[in-house]
Image (cartoon, grey):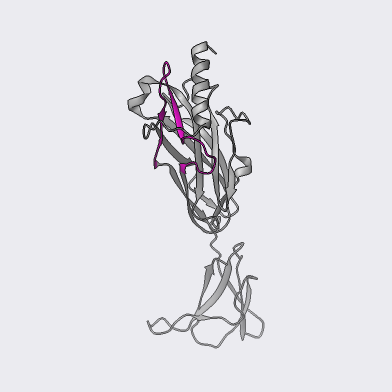
Amino acid sequence: MKLNSFLLGAVMLGLFLGSMSHATAQAVAVTARLDTSSIPAGGSTTLRVFAQVVPGLRPTTDRIFSWHLDVLNTNGAAASGNYAAMLKAASDKDPSISSFGVTQGANRRAVYDTFLNLPGAGVNAPVELMSIPVNGLAVGRTRFVIQAGTGAGLSSDFLVAPIGGGEPYEGGSYAAAFADLQVTAGNSCSPVLQIVRLAGGTQARITFTPCAGRTHTLESLSAIDGVAVWQTVAGAPHNSGNVVVNLTGSLRIYRLRITNP
């Protein structure tokens, strides 16, 4: 590292770890995305967080020097971030000046690092700050939101080193720093009812292949006249996929209702 670069790094590091503020708001645009926006319960995807210097500052910027962020999960019952498996592939990961953060409920706070060893970080192209595996837990929707870091006592969410030294640019814009995830019940499942009359002629067996993890209710209708209503067959729920019904001699229509547990 050249002497002027070394001195710049030392000054920036002091600002990063100190409490002084030299704010130039929104020097960096933060974005987030998921590898896939819909997963089944039990499935997984990856949340990725990126940063890039705003266009007006790129001609005078050496690199994003440091970053400090929180990751918020708005519905931890639907999905969880596997924060223990977080990667910060592009950052320095020096244990003395970085952290993988602290978990608070479904959130991860005070994740920070530096780019001392990555010239041009986040200037001409977005740089990936972190990637976090996400696991689907139950049917529902959640939003992962990235915000300025809290709890570490650092001077700023972003410090951006100017070319040739001088006061650093600071601050992040979070307008696009979120990603929505839908957790579904799993693969589509469309059972087909099969009806076989039993010996004696007074009963029939209705069978179907149940959907894993779902609740099945067989219902019957005695007429198609706009007045009759669907009635639940005795013995519900019918999760075995094997139901014996009595034959009354009158018209009887059957359907299978499938719901989440």
* Residue 24 on image: x %, y %: 36, 31
Q: Which residues are magenta?
A: 147-175
Tell me if residue 215 comes above or below residue 117 in the rendering.
below
- Name the residue at 39% across, 32% down: 23
Screen quadrant of the C terminus? bottom right
In the picture as drawn, the residue positioned furthest to the top comes out as 2
* Residue 179 on image: x %, y %: 45, 45
- Name the residue at 41% across, 36% down: 172
* Residue 116 on image: x %, y %: 54, 23
Tell me if residue 107 comes above or below residue 234 in the rendering.
above
- Quarter assignment of residue 226: bottom left
Give 68 or 88, whichever is nearer the viewer.
68
- Name the residue at 49% across, 33% down: 67
Q: Is residue 243 magenta?
A: no
Tell me if residue 79 comes above or below residue 24 in the rendering.
below
Give 212 or 3, whichever is nearer the viewer.
3
